[in-house]
Structure formats: C-alpha cells, structure tokens
C-alpha cells in the first residue's frame, strides 16, 4: 500500500473549500492528473454521489463519496483497473480560512503491485508537493 498526505491553509471559509473539493468536477482546476470528470449519479453532490473521470496514471476511474460531513470530513473511494484509492479530507476553521489535511491510501492491483516500491516515492513526491498549493491557488484566485 502507498500512503500519501498533505496539508494546506486556504483563505476561504470551510464550507466553500468543502463544496469545491467535494464536487470532483472541479478537480481538473487543481489536480493535474484529473480530466473529463462527470457526475454520473442523480441529485446534488453528497454521500453516495458517483463520478467518472480520466486519471493520467490510472485510466478511467469511478469515484464514490462514502462520507460527506459538510464542512468537516469527506471520504472518497476511487476504483480503476490498476488501483483502488481511499482519500480522506479533514477541514477545520483556521481564523478566517481553512486548514485542509488530506490523506490517501493507494492499493495497486495486478502486475502494478510489483512496481509499488518505485511508484511510492514518485507518488509521494508528486502528490505531497503539488496538491495543496494547487488547491490553494484554485480557491484563492
């Protein structure tokens, strides 16, 4: 299993940050690996919402919101042919802004598991240094 984490402070209220992150259609604005995101379930974004997206490293991915506790906790379950990813966001008010902490656990499938030691370092370096600043930039424009 590959574990990554990052945190960032965003100069926006928790409700605004939560809504932006929870709607995965915003992902391409701050996650360079994400594109062509579509909400495939009915109704507003919330617990049980399902999105499909193209992920640069993993291909077509189906992501379900498993936990939706606005504006404090959000958990996602993403599944693709080669990987399953569990993403957890914790948000807390920090003065006039929001502290965002994100953790992710990636479980590679099939032959990809053999590359896990190499991919772990690459994943951590890329995700841990880019996601927080990119989210901050997207929300503070």
Image (cartoon, helix red, strand yellow):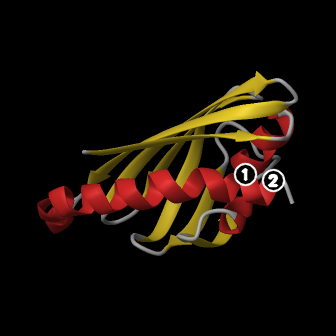
Q: Is residue 27 above or below residue 20?
A: below
Location of residue 37 in the rendering, given as x and y in whole percent from the top left corner = 66, 68
Left or right: residue 80 compared with residue 26: left
Left or right: residue 74 compared with residue 110: right
Structural distance between the alpha carbons of marks 1 and 2: 5 Å
Q: Is residue 107 above or below residue 75?
A: below
Residue farthest to the left? 114
Tell me which residue sits at (54%, 53%) in the image.
Answer: 63
Circle 2 crowding by C-alpha within 10 Å: few under 14, some 14–19, many from 20: some
Q: Which residue is mark 1?
A: 136
Circle 1 crowding by C-alpha within 10 Å: few under 14, some 14–19, many from 20: some
Front residue of this view, candidates 57 and 14? 14
Residue 126 in view in this figure: yes
Looking at the image, do the residues carrying marks 1 and 2 touch, with CB atoms under 8 Å apart?
yes
Figure disc tally: 2
Tell me which residue sits at (14%, 67%) in the image.
Answer: 111
Location of residue 9 in the rendering, given as x and y in whole percent from the top left corner = 70, 38
Q: Is residue 51 above or below residue 86?
A: below
The disc at residue 98 is none
Front residue of this view, candidates 26 and 79? 26
Give the position of the C terminus as an image quadrant: bottom right
Tell me which residue sits at (82%, 33%) in the image.
Answer: 97
The disc at residue 139 is 2
Location of residue 109 in the rendering, given as x and y in whole percent from the top left corner = 23, 58
Q: Is residue 113 above or below residue 4?
A: below
Residue 41 in view in this figure: no
Left or right: residue 112 compared with residue 21: left
For residue 53, what is the image quadrant? bottom right
Location of residue 79 in the rendering, given as x and y in whole percent from the top left corner = 42, 56
């Amino acid at each position: 299993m590959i574990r990554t984490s990052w945190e960032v402070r965003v100069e926006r209220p928790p409700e605004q940050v939560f809504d932006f992150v929870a709607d995965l259609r915003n992902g391409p604005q701050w996650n360079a690996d994400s594109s062509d995101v579509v909400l495939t379930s009915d109704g507003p974004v919330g617990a049980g919402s399902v999105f499909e997206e193209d992920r640069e490293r993993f291909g077509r991915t189906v992501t379900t919101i498993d936990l939706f506790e606005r504006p404090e906790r959000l958990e996602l379950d993403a599944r693709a042919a080669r990987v399953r990813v569990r993403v957890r966001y914790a948000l807390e008010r920090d003065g006039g802004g929001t502290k965002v902490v994100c953790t992710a656990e990636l479980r590679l499938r099939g032959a990809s598991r053999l590359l896990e030691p190499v991919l772990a370092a690459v994943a951590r370096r890329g995700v841990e240094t880019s996601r927080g600043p990119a989210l901050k930039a997207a929300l503070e424009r």
